[in-house]
Image (spheres, helix red, strand yellow):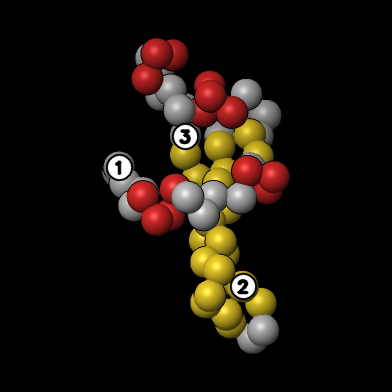
Amino acid sequence: MAGFLRPSDLERVDLDATVVSSDKVLSLNIVAPKEKRQGQRVTKVITIHPHTDPLLCPVAVFE
């Protein structure tokens, strides 16, 4: 399955909370600045698995 991020989601990625796990899985935290749930800002977690071709692998950018 493939997904796409909207430009508004890309600008809200919290780079300080971005993590690459030991098995090369990238986790991006997208923070919605105005949306709140129980007093906390809403955060979406996006998980990206590595591509087999290193030239097309978005995870390599964050390593």
Q: Say whether disc 2 or disc 1 marks the residue closer to the N-terminus.
A: 1
Image disc number at residue 2: 1
| Circle 3 SS class | loop
Q: Position of residue 27 (x, y in %)?
A: 57, 44
Q: Is residue 33 left or right of residue 6?
A: right
Per the model, the C-alpha gap separating discs 1 and 3 is 10 Å
Q: Say whether disc 3 or disc 2 marks the residue closer to the N-terminus.
A: 2
The one nearer the camera, 31 or 60, is 31
In the rendered view, would you say 11 is above or below 53?
below
Q: Position of residue 55 (x, y in %)?
A: 40, 13
Few, some or many C-alpha atoms within 10 Å of disc 3 (few <14, some 14-19, many ≥20)?
A: some
What amino acid type is highlighted by mark number 2?
A: Arg
| Circle 2 SS class | strand
Few, some or many C-alpha atoms within 10 Å of disc 1 (few <14, some 14-19, many ≥20)?
A: few
What amino acid type is highlighted by mark number 1?
A: Ala
Please give the residue where the numbered disc 2 appears in the rendered image.
41
Residue sitting at x 51%, y 28%: 59
Residue sitting at x 47%, y 34%: 49
